[in-house]
Amino acid sequence: EMCIRDSLSSYCCLYSQGFTKKTYYCTSINRFNNQHKFHLPSTEVSFPLNMMLPKLIQSNLKTVMIGQRIKYYSQLDSTNQKACELIAHNEGTHGTLVVTDNQHLGKGRRNNNWFMGTGKGVAVSLILDNPLSKEDTLFLPLITGIAAVKSLCSHNVVSKLKWPNDLMINSKKIGGILCESRISSSEVKYIILGLGINVNETIEDLPEYLHQMATSLFIETGEIQQRELII
């Protein structure tokens, strides 16, 4: 695993400089296959196409702190739950982004279940542990939703924010936001901003009861999206 990740880091470095753009986008087109091999001058690497690469996420960020530390997991019950655990063990510093390819027990408001196709959706949680006043946190869910809408717009997808936490396309839900915090006295000790977006799920991937209520970027556009770029 260490060897594979080292090789992928080199590949990500080349990609960020534009040397492997053609190869990478060909990989994106074939993401529904199980594996893909690419060649570097001194090595050959085989890896699951449904695995997101933290280095690629970071290479596209323009932030100073947010997302500069990424905790990646192949599968989790919940990214928000894992973020809480990291904070409890003093491993979740300000700006840490928790990312998974497979979230089993994602939740929305009122404990509603959130479905995510394995290796096809986006499930992330951002840890903010700089002390904030209660008033300062009131607009964070709205700000998160606006940022998500703007991100989708940059990929030529027009979505809307349905108050308080739903991302919608053509009256169907494509994503959701769940903010959780720990409050002490008048101060918020930390806040976790959870975001889930259906990206490459097909209509067959979605449970039948969601067919009239939910959608994905792939269903709406007919195009496979690079999930790292969505983040």
Image: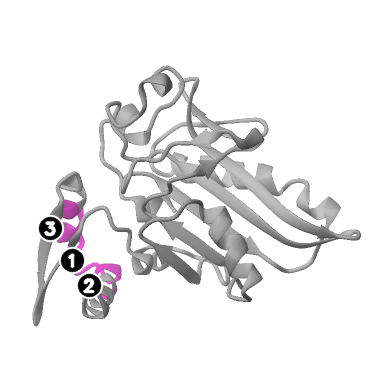
Q: Amino acid at mark 1?
A: Thr
Q: Is residue 182 above or below residue 151?
A: below
For marks 1 and 2, the one nearer the N-term is: 2
Q: Is residue 92 left or right of residue 28?
A: right
Which of the two discs, 3 and 2, sits closer to the camera? 3
User: Residue 173, percent across and down?
Assistant: 49, 28
> Which residue, given by chain and number where applicable, does mark 3 sit on?
36
CB under 8 Å between callouts 1 and 2?
yes
For image coordinates 38% across by 56% down, the residue present is 75
> Which residue, given by chain and number where applicable, does mark 1 sit on?
20
The answer to which of 94 and 104 lies nearer the viewer is 104
Q: Please name the predominant secondary structure of the magenta segment in the image.
A: helix
Q: Amino acid at mark 3?
A: His
Which of the two discs, 1 and 2, sits closer to the camera? 2
Q: Regarding mark 2 in the picture, which secondary structure is present there? A: helix
Q: Residues within 10 Å of mark 2 (few under 14, many from 20)?
A: many
Q: Amino acid at mark 2?
A: Tyr
- The residues colored magenta run 13-27
> Which residue, given by chain and number where applicable, does mark 2 sit on?
11
Q: Is residue 88 above or below residue 147?
A: below
The answer to which of 154 and 179 lies nearer the viewer is 179
Q: Is residue 19 magenta?
A: yes
User: Residue 162, percent across and down?
Assistant: 61, 29
User: Residue 33, percent across and down?
Assistant: 14, 47
Q: Is residue 89 left or right of residue 72?
A: right
Q: Residues within 10 Å of mark 1 (few under 14, many from 20)?
A: some
For marks 3 and 2, the one nearer the N-term is: 2
Separation of residues labelled 1 and 2 (CA atoms): 8 Å
Q: Is residue 163 magenta?
A: no
The answer to which of 208 and 125 lies nearer the viewer is 208
Q: Residues within 10 Å of mark 3 (few under 14, many from 20)?
A: few
Task: Locate the C terminus and report the quarter of the image it occupies.
Answer: bottom left
